[in-house]
């Protein structure tokens, strides 16, 4: 086991990565700003704190997931994907050394400003979609696209991080049967139902992420995990009123049936239109229309106030039964 020169800030990992301040925290761990003393560069180091409190079998699963994240990210060559530099073990836990991004996550930016302007959200979505297309082309699904995993560099770059639960084509799954991993309110309905995810599942999560950015809150988060999952599967989100030209794109991406969502190349054109302030006409084909049943149609039909005229030579019984015409 590696030994550190100190604990907390100043910890030296693998004889080269010296931890600085904490720059992020999530359910699985903490992210530190660190200095690579061999290559003299700033890096980010993710500490898997969950490993401290789990049984040996669970720790092995956590280690396997960490290795899988590194392999997944290594297969993708794209400027919008955070690069993994190294994976090491310290204190019986895995640590991931990654590219440092100077800037907040989309979640933090939204929390600070309340909402993101629609055209800027479309620009962010366009960059994330480009990274996802590269991942999908490499046989990798992200499976946890959410505002906290979208990083906004101060120089304008947009990057996606945390492939910790990524599915790699050809790899056996390292999740247990029945285990649901990911942030529930950003999981596609087919994943909540236990189905196999595909590229369309990542696009659904992108739609939920963009909704949260422009509206200021997740469209499906409820008071409990069960009610949240039920909302994802059965409820339509409120229409994104603040999304401007991005609204129909979000609605299209959030179709419950993955076969009814736009393909990545179609979504890319839609996001480009929205970013440039144009109404994405192609998105309208994916926006569901309200179905009206016969009863509703009959109730909505206008009433006839003026009867049709009765011919003067009609039978007397017909003329007697007909209502008098109004002037």
Image (spheres, rainbow, N blue to C red):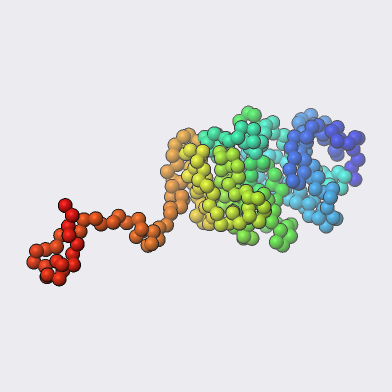
Query: Closer to the camera, 130 or 119?
Result: 119
Q: Is residue 28 left or right of residue 55?
A: left
Percent of width and height locating residue 280: 45, 41
Q: Residue at x 69, y 47 (%)?
A: 163
Q: Is residue 162 visible?
A: yes
Query: Closer to the camera, 78 or 124?
Result: 124
Q: Residue at x 67, y 41 (%)?
A: 148
Query: Closer to the camera, 75 or 251?
Result: 251
Q: Is residue 136 visible?
A: no
Q: Is residue 236 left or right of residue 320?
A: right
Q: Residue at x 55, y 54 (%)?
A: 235
Quarter where residue 217 is shown: top right
Percent of width and height locating residue 123: 55, 36
Quarter where residue 305 is shown: bottom left
Percent of width and height locating residue 257: 53, 57
Percent of width and height locating residue 121: 56, 37
Quarter where residue 197 is shown: bottom right
Q: Is residue 59 left or right of residue 145?
A: right
């Amino acid at each position: 086991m590696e030994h550190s020169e100190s604990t907390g800030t100043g910890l030296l990992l693998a004889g080269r990565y010296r931890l600085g301040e904490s720059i992020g925290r999530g359910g699985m761990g903490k992210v530190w700003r660190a200095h690579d003393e061999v290559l003299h560069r700033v890096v980010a180091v993710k500490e898997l704190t969950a490993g401290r409190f789990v049984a040996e079998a669970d720790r092995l699963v956590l280690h396997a997931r960490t290795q899988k994240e590194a392999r997944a990210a290594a297969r993708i060559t794209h400027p919008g994907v955070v690069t993994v530099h190294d994976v090491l073990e310290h204190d019986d836990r895995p640590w991931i050394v990654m590219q440092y991004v100077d800037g907040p996550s989309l979640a933090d930016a939204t929390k600070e400003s309340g909402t993101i302007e629609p055209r800027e959200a479309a620009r962010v979505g366009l960059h994330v979609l480009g990274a996802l297309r590269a991942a999908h082309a490499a046989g990798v699904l992200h499976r946890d696209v959410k505002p906290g995993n979208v990083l906004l560099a101060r120089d304008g770059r947009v990057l996606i991080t945390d492939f910790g639960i990524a599915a790699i084509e050809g790899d056996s799954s390292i999740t247990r049967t029945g285990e649901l991993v990911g942030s529930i309110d950003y999981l596609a309905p087919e994943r909540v139902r236990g189905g196999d995810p595909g590229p369309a599942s990542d696009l659904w999560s992108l739609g939920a992420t963009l909704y949260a950015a422009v509206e200021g809150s997740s469209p499906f988060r409820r008071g409990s995990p069960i009610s949240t999952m039920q909302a994802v599967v059965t409820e339509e989100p409120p229409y994104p009123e603040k999304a401007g030209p991005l609204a129909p794109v979000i609605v299209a991406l959030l179709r419950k049936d993955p076969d009814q969502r736009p393909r990545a190349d179609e979504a890319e054109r839609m996001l480009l239109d929205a970013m440039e302030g144009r109404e994405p006409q192609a998105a309208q084909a994916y926006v569901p229309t309200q179905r009206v049943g016969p009863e509703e149609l009959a109730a909505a039909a206008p009433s006839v106030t003026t009867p049709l005229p009765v011919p003067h030579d009609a039978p007397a019984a017909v003329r007697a039964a007909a209502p008098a015409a109004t002037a």
